[in-house]
Image (cartoon, rainbow, N blue to C red):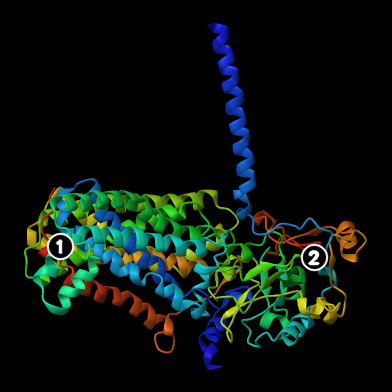
Amino acid sequence: MAIKKENFSRRDFIKNSSMFAGGVVLVSLLNPLKVVYATKKPKGKGKWYGIAIDIEKCIGCANCARSCKAENGVPNEPFFFRNWVEQYTITNDDEVKVSSPNGGIDGFTQPVSDDEIYKTFFVPKMCNHCAISPCTQVCPVGASFESPEGIALVDKSYCIGCGYCVQACPYGCRYIDPAQGVADKCTLCYHRLEKDLDPACMMACPTGARIYGDLNDKTSELYLFIKENNCAVLKPQLNTKSKLYYKDLSQEVH
Amino acid sequence: MNKYESLYEALANLDGYIYPNEIALNWDLLIVMYPYITGLVAGAFILASLNRVFAIKALRPTYEISLLTALSFMLVATMPLITHLGQPWRFYEMLVTPHLTSAMAIFGFVYLWYLMVVLLLEIWFDYRYDMVIWSKQKKGFMSFVYKVLTLWVLDTSPQSRRTDEKIGYFITVVGIPSAFLLHGYVGFIFGSIKANPWWSTVMMPVIFLFSAMVSGIALVMFIYMVVTYLRKQKIDMNTVDTISKYLFYILIIDFSLESLDQIHRIYEADESFDILKILVHGKLFFTFFIMQIGVGVIIPLLTMGTMMIKKPREKIRKILYLIISICVLVGIFYMRWNVVIGGQLFSKSFYGFTSYKVDMISGSGFWLSLLWFIIPFFILAFLLWLLPPWKKKESIH
């Protein structure tokens, strides 16, 4: 009897384990966890855009912000920006002062006297084109999406203007276009990239503080820049996999 | 210039540094109303369920009132959200082409499930028999209306009433987790935004749920007392005493959960703590400490607590219950305000604040918010006229 029972249990074992294996295969076919992630890096060999900014080189002229507004029809009021420049001043008393008058377009002044300044520098800001972008994740209709090249875009003819993406962006890079009632943001001048033209902000920068390029191309200027310099992204703890790299980023910059 | 006047004013009064796109608060008073109204629905329904599923006899007079209140507010629950959209006419895209990773998209389905499957069905099964009777009693158009409402299921046999009762009970049982889901989900819409440390907490759905129960129960208590008074009937003191007892306990749970959330923030004191501390002690001082905690929690808890130790006379109790329910409703409104508006007052750069004023004159937000809060009371008045709970035949059980 004992032997017989063992036979049965072996058969049961095979039966159960094949059922379990089948179940696992079935579940993995359905791939339910897929929806958790907003986007994934495509497996192909296409372009995968990233940006790098050399903080040392930025002189705070805000030509980037100005040219962006002109190129992309961003409203002129000081509440709507696809990119802007911040001035950081850290005093000898460890006080951090940040300003960005009209996104830097109106020019900067330095209210802190020279001998009280510990350090001061400019930080240009723009969409981080995150690889795991929280803004596209929350869009209720999928009007915010990521292009195969890793650029976060908005389909304005589809956006309902709920503003959820504006809330979800940790970097304050989105706004609701007051004229159209839909979300707007940096597209890395996608319309220009399509024609092999550089984005407006890259063209307008007089010191070459900003570069962009294909992160998949190991010989690109961008790839080598990130490799050779000490680069960091903003708010890495949020795991957005930002693709906007800053050279020698101070920890005070948020 | 005029269009942006309030923004220029905010710009002139900036406190520290804020990302330029953050000067404009995208989610205004209308988005405060959205979780507020949804919470009232969930809370009112849960009170009805307590009566039915746990057979709490004392709550019986409020059963239909709770359900009809829930329905009245449910019908407008999405309106603040829709009227706030930059492109309101595209709202249906959320249901037609939902983006599955979006909490907001899934809310549409949770809402429809709750409205269509839970609320309407429960009310229908509860009223079907009475609607058949009324269709026979009334003449002309109203008879036809009731007949339509019965969907031509005109069986009045005890057997059919038992079936109504059974299915109704089953729907209530399904309804409780659905109501939990409905408002827990609203909490998740905020709680899942990792970019915003004031919102991003796993406690958010639970806090929203309990605050919803508190506000819904207070609303039903208020409506029951006012409706009974208007009908010149005697308020069942056992009923209001029992509701107040539940309100007391659930308010304690709600306050404990919110305190736990705050204590956790204070003790952990992560990178966002400094800015949130200034926020709570500064721009939110009045709405948080005075309105949400003082008016919404401390006054009701102390009053109800004292009443439990020493019961005052009926007349005084009635007045106190009315005041308590209003206090709780105001307090929960400010709780929603502190979450929605408070979460946008500080910069995600953690270096400063913007400001927000409700624009009562030129802005549409204020008047629309008021409208969406008042309309449910008219719907409720209509429903109470159409389906008067006090004219229902007693249940066969």
Residue beneath disc 2: A50
Disc 2 element: strand
Name the amino acid, label 1: Asp
Residue A226 placement: quadrant:
bottom right
Pick out the residue farthest to the bottom. Answer: B1
Asked whether, in this view, residue B356 is left or right of residue A234, the answer is left
Front-most of residues A91 and B88: B88
The tag on residue B307 is none
* Mark 1 or mark 2, whichever is nearer to me: 1
- Measured as percent of width and height from the top left, residue B362 is found at 43, 89
Kindly identify which residue carries mark 1.
B130
Res. B282 in view:
no
- Quarter of the image for the N terminus of chain B: give it: bottom right
| Residue at the image position 47 percent from the left and 77 percent from the top | B84
Residue A233 picture location, percent across and down: 74, 60
Seen at 79% across and 55% down, the residue is A43
Residue type marked 2: Gly
Subunit bearing disc 1: B
Relative to the observer, which residue lies in front, A243 or A118? A243
Inspect this view and state whether residue B25 appears. Answer: yes
Badge 1 vs badge 2, beta-carbon distance below 8 Å: no
Q: Are marks 1 and 2 on the same chain?
A: no
